[in-house]
Amino acid sequence: MTPSQFAFSTAFALGLTGLALHRHHLLSALLCLEGMMLSLFIALSLWTLQANCTYFAVAPMILLAFSACEAGAGLSLLVATARTHGTDRLQSLNLLQC
């Protein structure tokens, strides 16, 4: 495993660990998801550069577009949650209530 692959897999694992263990606030969960998407984007970009395949070069841009859509949806859910519940703590959310 090259040092760059180790760095990106470690960054992804740290984001996944943060998402699994630190689920107190919705904002921290969203930041962990963004860290995971960023490590995937950089790894995919470096992979297409190292593989020297031009037909797959658009894949990192598609991943970045999906990441931006995910961030926008997450922030809108954060604002809606903060307005209705008054906090972004995940323990105060109940999925059975509408």
Image: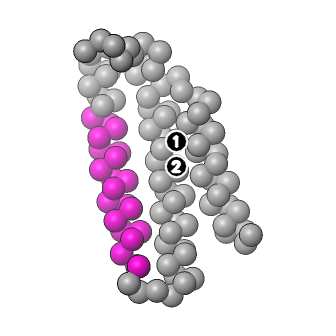
Residue 95 place in picture, x, y as percent? 36, 18
> In the structure shown, which secondary structural element does the residue marked by tag 1 occupy?
helix
Q: Is residue 87 visible?
A: no
Image: 32 above or below 80: below
The one of 44 and 96 positioned closer to us in this rendering: 96
Which residue does the image show at 50% across and 33% down from the upper left? 28
Q: Amino acid at mark 1?
A: Cys
Q: Position of residue 60 (x, y in %)?
A: 41, 69
* Residue under the point 57% across and 82% down: 50
Dot 2 corresponds to which residue?
A: 35
Q: Secondary structure at mark 2?
A: helix
* Location of residue 67 with respect to 28 vertically, above or below: below
Q: Quadrant of residue 10?
A: bottom right
Cα distance, mark 1 to mark 2? 5 Å
> Which residues are the magenta region?
56-76
Q: Position of residue 65 (x, y in %)?
A: 32, 60
Residue at the (44%, 38%) spot, across then down: 30
Compared across the picture, whether 6 is left or right of 44 comes to: right
What's the amino acid at mark 2? Gly
Q: Which image quarter holds the C terminus?
A: top left
Label 1 Cα crowd, 10 Å radius (few <14 / some 14-19 / many 20+): many
Q: Residues within 10 Å of mark 2 (few under 14, many from 20)?
A: some
Quadrant for the N terminus, please. bottom right
Tell me the residue that label 1 is attached to: 32
Image spot of residue 97 (x, y percent): 30, 12
Q: Quadrant of residue 23?
A: top right
Question: Where on the picture, by quarter, is residue 19?
Answer: top right
Q: Are marks 1 and 2 in contact (CB under 8 Å)?
A: yes
- 61 is higher (above) or lower (below) than 83: below
Q: Is residue 1 magenta?
A: no
